Image (spheres, coloured by chain):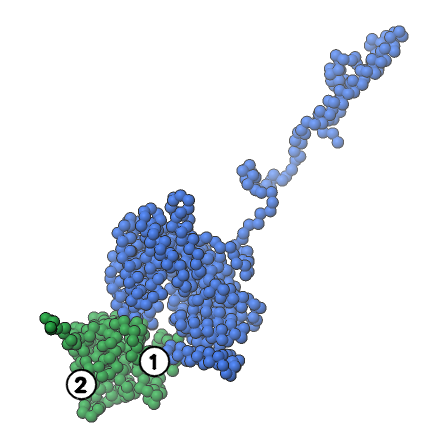
Chain colours: A blue, B green
Amino acid sequence: MLDAMESPPPSGAKARGQSGATGAIAPPLEPDAPAEATEPDDSHGWLRAVLAVIAAVVTAGLGARLWWRRRRRPRPAPTPTPSIAAFFATDVPVPTAEAIELKPPEWVYEDSPYATPPLYLVPDPVDLLLPATSTSPGGDTLLTHLQAIDVNPALHLVGDDRFPEIRRVGEGIAGFDAWQAVLEDACKGEGDDAHLARWLAPAILMLRSRDVRRRDAEVLLEDAAQRTRDGMNRAADEERPHWVARAIRVELARIERLSGAMRLFALRALQSRQAVDLGAEEPPVLDAWIDVQLAWAGWLLGGGAAARQAEAEALCDRLAAISPEATTRALRRRAEIFLQRAEGEKGAVRLASLQRAQSLLEDAYAQGGDAGTALLLARCARLRAMALPPADAADACSLGLTHAFLAEQDPAWRMDALECRLSIQLTYESLPGRAVQGEVAASLGRELASMEADSVGARTAMAATRLREGDFAGASALCEAAWRGGGGDTHLLNLWRDACRGWTQTADTTGHDRHALALAVRQLAIARATL
Amino acid sequence: MKPPHPPNHTPSPFWNTRYGITAAVATDNVVARSLQLYGEWAEHETNLLSGLIEEGHGVLEFGGDFAAHALWMAHAVGPHGQVHVVEPRRIRFQQLCANVALNQLDNVFTHPVWLDRSEGIHSFGAKETVRAITIDSLQLESVHLMKFNLADTLVEALAGATETLRAHRPLLYVRLSGMDQAAAEVASIKALGYRVWSHVPYLYNSDNHAGVENNIFPGLVQQNAIAAPADSHFDFGDRLEL
């Protein structure tokens, strides 16, 4: 098929073109040219024939070459055919050259928020330490030094960039000495690292104080309070609310170590001391004061607790009015209040409080999702599952598992999230009509054990899995450890009772096993009697 | 050669306790021994009660215990609250009053009477007789907590408190009297429409005020009970309900 350029030209044009091109070389070859051929010259006939042949060959060769060159030229765009597609065309942005270059010529799989997280895969460790703010050369910063401390369970920095908090995983004390040494060293200098170290130093002292006797704790907390006062004196105006919040939390840590009877007086004194700072609408201060109100409510029963929770809600209202970030924070804090209320409630009232807490947490997670909120949401969903009818409880378990998975991706929350997953799994499998799902719970239990999880909740959950596997002695030991660690609720003691019963039926009648069982039963009796 | 100023071994007439100054007394009973050595008495009880008492509350305590708990309760209820302490034993009553005066507690009211189901005279011991009254006759304006420390007094005292219990529905904290009487005491509380939970605190508090690690009450506990009206919002869910 020929295009417009290749269509055969009219005969006259062809003759003109060809003669034009070849006229200097050869005469026209048309055999029927009539004009000058009046009378042939017989003496030059053969010569004319040879010349004619040569001219024909040359002309043919040039023509073929010209045709070939025309074939090699780029073909021009064809004339667009009429189409109605334009009437349906949408505004599709034309990709720029840069965009085209950025697209690799292979498939790109994008993450989806609905993607199923990988099961039972230990993710690569993620560095959650904050990006270095110091400009020290060679990465020789406070954060790199803290990162280099390789202990398990680890301490993590979470929260605000400039004023982070130290999150402790589990009950272990490994790493405190090394962290404190690094912080002490960094405090001596100047610059961002020293600033951060001075901010973190009281926090590490507060954490340490929880593991020592009251009198030793008082010394550590007094040191923390003094460092906080020093920090407040050095602080710029915009930093002061953070230091005030730190001072409130140090005082709260001191109050927690007092006997219940002394706490009451200490809390009243704190309230009167902080009256001026509480009048200002500063998010860090309001947040810290919500901590105080929640702790206070946790130490009261009945109307006293309700009054403190109402006070905390009023603080949430003030917090929410300050800024969008503070609004998100207020959502989460309000959810914590409803969760605490639910602890003392039953039936439909409890379920309503849990529902409200979950709704607030979902909003908070949607606005600024972090692992801590995800974990709280997972725990809330589990509590709801325990209060809902079985059909709805399964959905609540699913929601809880999803958010526990999300929280698990953050190393600072991983152990707690695993514990939560195990608890949800056990709750799900205990629902009517649900069977034990293979090795899921057992596998989670083993994973927690391998992480040396030592919180009361983790030990209780692991004890439940051991009990189900028939390891009664192991379950009893975990229950006892949880009790010694501060646990003492009815669920734990019932679990311990079941472990001892199972153990009684399987233990040897003589020997070490029997002796250990007798000791466990005695400890259980003491635990029950001293509730 | 004698030192110019021999050390003074005279014991101090006061003890510095957790909630104030206490006049020293003969240490012939566990309360006095605990106050002297640890600077506190039955602190686990106050720990539990600290979650129940608020500013402005009214408290009635039967059995003074040298004001060991009245000192704390007076501060806990504050200037708008009242603490009524009933102590029938003469010497104990005087010691109680001394400690209240020493600590300038103007919201504490002391009563040298016996609490009974009806008014009259009550005899105890070989020599002492004391006036018996009913709790109702005290005509308390408000009472949020009644605390019974004396053994073998609960059933009779509650029998004389019908109107007060009906009007104020206070919480009850009771030291049960022993194996023989405990069941009857719990039953008498339940008969008033109360739910009862067990509280078994150790006498020794490892976190005591004086920081003394020596436990002179090894393994000793009290068998107490906390009770709340069945229609109230109090629920000690993690405790053993009796």
Q: Which residue bears the numbered disc 1? A: B219
Which residue lies most toward the bottom here?
B126
Type of amino acid under label 2 = Arg
Q: In the shown orientation, is residue B45 left or right of residue A334?
A: left
Q: Is residue A91 visible?
A: no
Q: Nearer the viewer, residue A96 or A221?
A: A221
Of B143 and A108, the residue lying toward us: A108
Q: Residues within 10 Å of mark 2 (few under 14, many from 20)?
A: some
Name the residue tied to disc 2.
B90
Q: What is the secondary structure assignment of the residue under circle 2?
A: helix
Q: Which numbered disc, 2 or 1, marks the residue closer to the eye?
A: 1
Q: Is residue A212 above or below residue A8?
A: below
Residue A18, given in percent of the width and then of the height, sits at 75, 17
Mark 1 falls on what kind of element? Answer: loop
Q: Residue B160's spot in the image, x, y percent?
A: 26, 86
Res. B197 image quadrant: bottom left
Q: Chain of mark 1?
A: B
Judged from this view, the residue extending furthest toward the right is A42
